[in-house]
Structure formats: structure tokens, C-alpha cells
Image (cartoon, grey):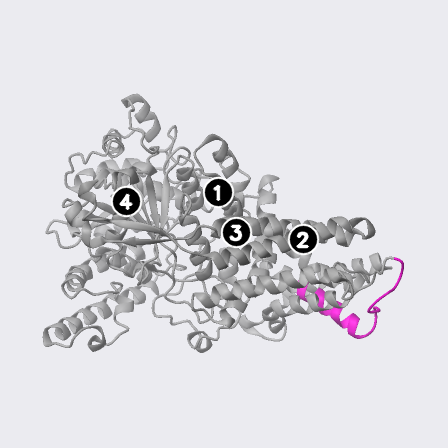
Amino acid sequence: MANEIPFPLYHKNARKNTIQRALDTTLFFLLISLLFYRLLSLKTHGFVWLLAFLCESWFTFYWFLIVNAKWSPVDIKTYPQNLEPRFPELPTVDMFVTTADPVREPPIMTVNTVLSLLAVDYPADKLACYVSDDGCSALTFYSLVESSKFAKLWVPFCKKYKVQVRAPFRYFLEDPISISAPNFEFKEEWEKIKVEYEHLLKIKEASRKSAPCNLTHDFAVFANIETGNHPTIIKIIGENCEEDVPHLVYISREKRPKYRHHFKAGAMNVLSRVSGLMTNAPLMLNVDCDMFVNNPQVVRQALCQLVGRESERDMGFIQYPQCFYNATKDDPYGNQMVVLMEYIGRGIAGLQGPPYAGTGCFHRRKVIYGVWPDNAASINDYEAMKEFGKSEEFLESATHALKGEKGIRKSISDYLEASFQVAACDYEFGSSWGTKFGWIYGSMTEDVLTGLNIHKKGWKSNFHFLDPPAFLGCAATGGPAAMTQQKRWATGLLEILVSKSNPIVFTLTGNLQFRLYLFYIYLLSWGLTSVPELCYAALPAYCIIANSHFLPKVQDPAILIPVAIFVTYNMLTLREYLKVDLSFRAWWNNMRMARITATSAYLFGVLTIVLKLLGLSDTVFDVTQKNDEASEDEDDDEINGTAKFTFDESPIFVPGTTLLLVHLTALLSFCLGLRPLVHKDAQGSGVGLGEVLCSLWVVLCFRPFMKGLFRIGKYGLPSSTIFKSTSLALVLVCLGTASWA
């Protein structure tokens, strides 16, 4: 301990949040008060009152889960300058990049991610970059071959001049004089590198051709290739012989129609095994193909938390928040998650730690291989062979990794033949890959499931904010891409919730802390919020049409409770946005998108899981469309920060459009006097002012859909969507009218 005092690696400090706690608690007790009021008056009201009570019960429970996650925020301070004095021999790191579709994920984007990884501020001989191409694309391989040539110039240039942004497409957006002190040598090299990068952009030209290059020599294996039916392809593009540029390896695992491939989780497990053979680094970093290194110190920053004091050996992984370089002003699609990361992220960092988010994460190899904290790896050869597969070479490397030994590493090309075996379709048969260790199968959100499996063993994790951010990624732009992404997340999270790997089981049988268990319930229940959200959003329109009410009347003192809840919640959330320097408009965009997403994307996630449980369909992984680095396809309004909501013919937009049409019909009937404002009887029933104001609020939240009714092209709702929604709306209005009659 005495030796640790002069060279601390990091500190975790609790953040004061007295005001935040007070506001969160106040809102919680207001929700409880509303539930008590509902219960006390339930006998004198009908079905509408009961439905409102059930929805509000869920909202209260969900708010309790949110408060639990936000309750104990922490700040983490690292000291990378103390790393070498403490550990002169730095550990090796294997870096993984995954891509699946060269059309939706342009190769030039993957190239920039890879180049930024190769150029991080860390010894090149201690790094290796592995790229998994699940699309088995000759274009992707060609792009990496070309980028490896450019890397021999780019990596030394970045390290010589201490370049901050090491993804070329972002770096060359600035003038060289604004980047560094003007001197002839730097400017000359800068211009030379820029010319070479512009030459590298021929990758874009190649992407428009049927074949990016002549399919001969190293490219011959891609001739007549089928994306879902091909042998393993592994190519060592660059081997670190001169210790200037890290290893670069291309991997396209074997795929056959009769075998399940487990989406990204299967690709990550192949990366783990191939890298285990070739370099077997004790630490692994994985990033998506659209997420480049924005802070070149990120590896050292993560090491400060992973190789710290003896008592911190239980740190399983370090997760960095997702930030975006193409973030549109004021977050019009509500998918930048700034406030979520700031409050929920810091809060759960004060517990057992954040979940694994699938990208921007440093893992210990032995943790991925299934080791429990403070549990020595004691396995005999037979058991290890059964657990890890039938490759003797991989068994040897896994044994070294589990025991924390370096082992004897040869040239990575010496393990090329063995790598083909561990990347085969049938390698995992009879092993525990995807079940007990590795990236866990069973969900489209394999990242959350894998992190949950790590946490249940008692491992901790950290959520680390850096300035500048560690990584920058590409946010989904446009309504279809954003909604499809949200649907995939909701579906994958619900898959975990209804599986045997849910947090309830892990809390009872593992070492998952109770408060983190509550957080996982909040996270996995995102999709379930669609049902009460949709019901509650439809209640005001139903009450107007059916001449009923679900809120206390204006003259009833109890009306103050829902009014106080509405005001407190909006003021509380607005405060959170303003405190992280976001605008009022950003707050409003996120509030309305929360309603739109819950009643549309999340609803389809629930329906997908119901159909899966009934055996009527299976989940399908949809790759999110990404724009390339030049943002060529963005409209002027998006560049200027006034992005309009876009639509397509996906049925995901039908529920939101239907809900809007029902509310417009209800308000029109009210304005035309087709329903009385108050129908007095013994119970004082009849629609009230509260229902009308709530209906107007819903219409305001779905304003992008209302604009879409009168626009054409991608900014307008397709006629097929309008027809389906109108038909559904007429049915619902008729049902409401019948119940009133």
C-alpha cells in the first residue's frame, strides 16, 4: 500500500445531489398520492378509472426504478501519467471492430475507425486490431488493405505531432494552422498525408462498382462468394514486424445456411478465439465500425482502472459512453442519450457498475472466458477441452489467459491455420461458448446479456466520462433508422427479460447486487412501457368521445395532484437538460420522442416477442443505416440543425398516426358540440377540461406525424400508412361512441 500512495491511478468520488434527490423523491410521493386517491374513489368510477390506475401504478413503479438508478452518482478521476511508474511493462490489448453490411455500413467508415485504433497513444507492438466482416465483402477487405498502406504514414504522423483526433475524415476537416503551430515541416507533412488520404477515398469509387478490384491473388477467395454461405476467410493484412504499426487482421467467419450464427455475439466469440490464438492479450477493446477513437489516451485511461490496486482486481470491464460526431442540433430524434448517460450512467457507476453497451468497452479476457472474481482457474485438460472446444492450440492459449500467464507468443502468422478451425461453424458444438462464457447468445442485445452474465458473477464495472470523449460514433438519422434501432433494442431487452438469464434468476443464484438488479429491471422493461403509455395516451380521446373522464374535475381539490405531477416532472427533466448545457428545444424533442418511441417502436418490440413466444416467428437483426463520413446525403436543413422528421412505409409508423387521428377526431367532435362539456348526474360524470388539455398535449407530442399528413416524399406519411391508420382510427372511434351510447 505504501508504494501506491505516490502513484494513484484513479479515484472514484461520490457526487453531491441533494436537490436532485429531493425533486425525485417529491415526484415519487406525488405519484403514490395519486394512486391512493384512485383506490379510495375506485368504487364510484368505472373501467376508465381502473385503467388509469393500472397505468399510473406502472409509471410509479418505473419512476422508483429510475430514482434507484440515479441515487448514487460518482465521478471518476484517472491519472494516466502514473501508469508507467507503477507498471513499466504495459499489458497488450486486442482491439475488435465489427461490421456486417458494406451498404448500410460504408467501408470508408470502417477504415476511419480502424485507422484511429491503430494510431492510439500506446506502444504499437502491444496492440493488435481484428476486423470482423460478417458481410464477407471483397470491398471491405480491399478497403482494409488500402488503409494499411495509409496507416504506415498516418500512425507515425499522429504520434510525432500528438494529433488529438486520429480519424482522418475528422482531422482533415480543420485547417492545419488551426491544428498546430505553423511550421514548414509540419505543413509539408500535413499536405502530404492529406493527399494520401484523398487517394484512399478511392474506396468510395470502388463501392459503386460491381467488383472493387480484380479478384485475383489475395482477393481470389471472394470470387462467387455468397454472403450467408461461405468458408472462413482470415487474412493478416499487416503484421507488426518493425514495431511502428499494430497488427491488422481481417476475419470473415464461416457461414452455412443450416447453422445458427447468433448475430454480433457469434462474430465477437470468433474474434475472441482467433485473437486468443494469435496475440492472446489480457485486455480486449471492442468498438462498432462507426465509432472512432476521439481521445488517443483512451487505452491508458482504461488501464488506470483495470490494473489498479490489489483490492480492485474485481473490475470486470470499463464502459465509455456513446457520443456522436453527427449529432443534429437539439437531438430531434431523441437518440443521443446525453441526459440518460449523465444521470443514469453516473448513478449506476456508484453501484456495481453500468451494463455493457456493446461498443467502446474494455474487457478482461479472463472475464470473457468465464472466470469469477478471486477464483483461481483450476481446470484439467479434459474439462477445458470440453468447455473451450476441440482446438489444442486454443486450449493452450486459453489456459494461459485464465491463469494470467503471458505464454510464449510466436509470429501471428504461425497461428493462421489453427485460426481457421476456431472460426468454423461447427467449432462451438459441445462447448460452452455463448452459454457459460464469451458473448452470450439468446438476445439481439447480446451486449446487455453478456454484461449481465458478468455482473451476476460479482464482477464490477465502471462508467468513465472523458473530456474530450473517448469515442465518437454515428447516430441514426431520420425517423425510420431511429425507430428501427429503438425497436431492435426493445426486442432484444425483452428477450432477456423473458429468458432464463433474467436478472431475477441472477440475483437469487449469483452475486448480482439488489440495486443493480432493480436497474436491470428498468432497462429490460423499456419495451413493456409501450402498453401503459399507449393506453394512457389514448384515454383522453376515449373520454371525450365516450363522454367520460379519467381525471378529477377542475372544482375537485384532488385535481392538484395530477397537475403537480405534470409540472414537477417537466420542471425536473428540464432542469436536468439545462444543467448539462442542452437547450429547451432539446428537452422538448426528447420528451415528445419518448412518447412517440414508446407507442410505436417499443410496441412493435413487444409484438415481436409475443409472436416469438407463440412460435409464430423469430427475431431478425436489422442493421441500422449509417451515413459515411462526408455526410453527402444530408439535407441542408439537417446540416443547419433543423432536421425534419422522416418517414417510410414501415408499419412502425401506423400506431402513432392512428393515435393522432383518434385525438384529432375527438377534439373535432368536442369543438363541434357533438359531446357536452359536462354531463351532470349523481356521479358527476362527463368529459372535463382536463381530458381536453391532455388530448391537446398528445397532439402536440405527435406534431411530426401531423406535419407528415400534409407533406410529400420522405417528409410525408406514405398513403398506405395513412389508409391503415385511418381505418384503425375509425374502428376505435366507433367503439368509443358505442360505449358512450
Task: Please name the residue that numbered disc 4 is placed on.
Answer: 306
Answer few, some or many: residues within 10 Å of disc 4's Cα (few below 14, many 20 plus, some between 14 and 19): many
Instruction: Identify the image quadrant of the N terminus.
Output: top left
Residue 281 locus on image (x, y percent): 23, 42
| Residue 342: quarter of image | bottom left
Percent position (x, y) of residue 383? 32, 23
Q: Is residue 589 above or below residue 243?
A: below
Please give the label number shown on residue 515.
Answer: 1
Residue corresponding to mark 2? 33
Q: Which amino acid does label 4 sit on?
A: Leu
Is label 1 or label 2 in front?
A: 2
Secondary structure under the numbered disc 1 in the rendered image: helix
Q: Which is nearer the N-term, disc 1 or disc 2?
A: 2
In front: label 3 or label 2: 2
The mark nearer the N terminus, 3 or 1, is 3
Q: Is residue 697 magenta?
A: no
Residue span colored magenta: 659-682
Q: In this view, does 585 lie to the left or right of 187?
A: right
Going by the image, does 365 lie left or right of 345?
left
Q: Is the residue 291 above or below the residue 461 in the image?
A: below
The residue at the point 31 percent across, 66 percent down is 204
Asked whether the beta carbons under mark 3 and mark 2 sit within 8 Å of each other, the answer is no
Which residue is labeled 3 in the image? 67
Left/right of residue 633 with respect to residue 277 in the rendered view: right
First in sequence, mark 4 or 2: give its number. Answer: 2
Q: Which residue is drawn at 50% across and 32% down?
A: 508
